[in-house]
Amino acid sequence: MMLRGLWKLTWIEIKVFMREPLGAFGTIGIPVLIFVALGRVANLKFGGIMPAANGLPRGDLPVLVALLIAISAVLSLVTIISIYREGGILKRLRATPLRPQTILSAHVIVKLLLTAATLALMFLAGKRYFPPGAGIPWLSFTIALLISTWSILSIGFLIASIVPTARFAQPIGAVILYPMFALSGLFVRVEYLPPVLRAVAHLLPLTYAVRLLEGIWNGDGWMAHMGDVAALTALFLIFTAISAKVFRWE
């Protein structure tokens, strides 16, 4: 019964999401367009297919866009939860036989499915930059992104728990999330940061997501990044536990 309710609610949430063309384009289309635009710039710079060497063209670009997909999913989650709370939808849902965990799990599943769909479109759009013979672990990278998004979504629940109204949901979420890019190790390695910022970086899922995504993209085995997976799982549990304590249904 619980699983049936979960999948039915998940399907409803997908249909509601797709009824808003601008929201769907922002979540799915914009990361793909950014990837294509940056890919074209890098392609022009190197005069052909991106080189296999590590660096921005081959490694950091997909990781950057993958993180944009994850952040987009989180901002969408924060906005939807805020709208549902402000409109009394959460209160009505909680009065149904569905458990609160089921309601929140449906939102997580929707975001993970949209993340996978966006990444698939990104791969299709990037075929000219990363040909089939390039030896890129697409499947492992997709799994790594889903794990990363799953963990980063826990920050979204925490933000959604404290955002007062839907009007301020995305601005507050953006102010909190996007500065994390500077500490994630994507642009400046964590070990080069000052001690205080380094300590903060180790409390953020983005730090471990970058390390996991970069490693998998560059061909590392999963055993080399089990620590990152464990950290992402632990942070998910911690942020979820905190948000469960402060979450407001109305």
Image: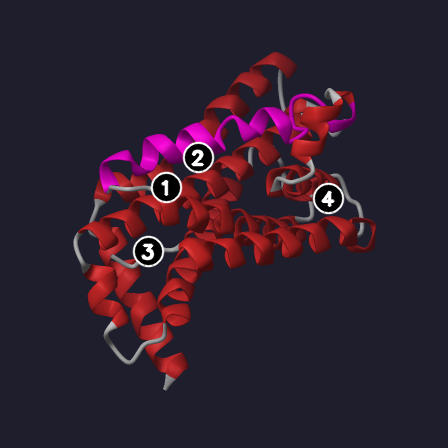
- Measuring 37% from the left and 44% from the top, which residue is drawn there? 162
Q: In screen coordinates, is 160 left or right of 193?
A: left
Q: Which numbered circle lies on residue 31? A: 2
Q: Which numbered circle lies on residue 166? A: none
Q: Nearer the viewer, mark 4 or mark 3?
A: 3
**What is the CA distance from the residue labelled 1 to the residue labelled 3?**
25 Å
| Residue 140 visible here | yes
- Measuring 43% from the left and 51% from the top, which residue is drawn there? 157
| Label 1 close to label 3 by CB (< 8 Å) | no
Mark toward the start of the polypeptide (2 vs 3): 2
- Measuring 45% from the left and 44% from the top, which residue is drawn there? 121
Q: In which quarter of the view is residue 103 placed? A: bottom left
Mark toward the start of the polypeptide (1 vs 3): 1
Q: Which numbered circle lies on residue 135? A: 4
Q: Nearer the viewer, mark 4 or mark 2?
A: 2
- According to the picture, the residue beneath numbered tag 3 turns out to be 248
Let me know if residue 168 is in the magenta part. Answer: yes
Q: Secondary structure at mark 1?
A: helix
| Residue 23 coordinates in the image, percent (x, y) | 27, 42
What amino acid type should be assigned to the residue bearing mark 1?
Thr
| Label 4 close to label 2 by CB (< 8 Å) | no
The boundaries of the magenta stretch are: 166-191
What amino acid type should be assigned to the residue bearing mark 3?
Arg
| Residue neighbourhood size for the residue with mark 4, other residues' Cα within 10 Å, grouped as few (<14), some (14–19), many (≥20) | few
Quadrant containing the N terminus is: bottom left
What amino acid type should be assigned to the residue bearing mark 2?
Pro
Mark toward the start of the polypeptide (4 vs 1): 1
Asked whether 243 or 167 is in front, the reply is 243
Q: Which numbered circle lies on residue 27? A: 1
